[in-house]
Amino acid sequence: MIKVLDQHIQELDLMKKYPKDIFYIGNTNLLSKRKISIVGSRTPNQYARQIISQISTKLSNVGVCIVSGGAMGIDAIAHKNAGYNNTIMVAGTGLDKRYPAVNKNIIEKIEEQGLVLSQFKAGVPSNRWNFPLRNELVVALSEVLIVAYADIDSGTSRSVEYALKMGKEIYVLPHRIGESDGTNKLLADGKAKAIYDIDKFVAQFGDIKSDEIKDKFLEYCKTNPTYDEAMVKYPAKVFEYELSGKIEVKDGKIITI
């Protein structure tokens, strides 16, 4: 059920104009947690996908709520790896719409377990001028903005502009020359810091404990599940561990190395 938020969110005072109404579905208790926003390209490279899956998981494990915009690519990866019960999605449409349609299942799970917010009334469709407002709200909610992957003059650059105006710290992933030119330029211009060590970055926000999720995944792989079964249960981990050479797929089954 779509409701109107009746509490003042102090973080949103940094916006150019405090929203007249904020509509929501889900658990508003997440608004009181420490929050970090993660944004980036809808078509990131494999490296960005892998690193953001790790960062989102580890931040969530230390109690940080992950905020993003529900789009394909980096947004979806951040939401899924944070855990649907510890993520806030900010929509660029009315909450009776689930946009983009390809993420319908993800959005429904966030509605059930996490929190979805919007400045737009029910019935408002996807319009390109909605998304700058969506991006401003994504940035304002959190104390830090992580930009995972961005081309120069991409839509993500608007989020960076908001973060700079609000005085938010901006972090990016270090990319090779010719990849993610937008984030590389932020580093070159001194407008962002690079995340070179994931655990060191996460430790700023909470005490890191043993990675139980990773251990559980390895134990699961030792049962030699099929690739399809593993992708249903641990999609991000299958990708991450296959890239790092810890598992391999043989005859349709997962094998530990």
Image (spheres, rainbow, N blue to C red):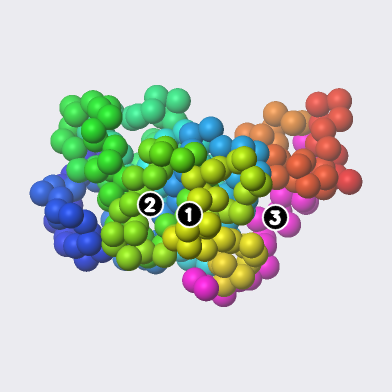
Seen at 41% across and 65% down, the residue is: 169
Residue 102 percent coordinates (x, y): 45, 25
Q: Give the residue number, with chain letter if any, for mark 1.
A: 186
Residue 40 percent coordinates (x, y): 47, 43
Rounded to the nearest angstrom, the CA distance separating label 2 from label 3 is 32 Å
- Residue type at mark 1: give it: Leu
- Which residues are the magenta region? 204-225
Question: Residue 214's mark?
Answer: 3
Residue 28 sits in quarter:
bottom left
Residue 3 percent coordinates (x, y): 18, 44
Residue 216 percent coordinates (x, y): 71, 54
Q: Is residue 234 visible?
A: no
Residues 161 and 3: in front is 161
Seen at 35% across and 29% down, the residue is: 99
Extreme-left residue of the structure: 20
Rounded to the nearest angstrom, the CA distance separating label 3 from label 1 is 32 Å
Q: Is residue 145 visible?
A: yes
Extreme-right residue of the structure: 257
Tell me if 12 is positioned left or right of 231 in this view: left
As displayed, is residue 58 above or below residue 205? above
Question: Residue 160's mark?
Answer: 2
Secondary structure at numbered mark 3? helix
Tell me if 149 is positioned left or right of 144 in this view: right
- Residue type at mark 2: give it: Val
**Crowd band around label 2 with a 10 angstrom C-alpha radius: few (<14), some (14–19), many (20+):** many
Q: Earlier in the sequence, mark 3 or mark 1?
A: 1
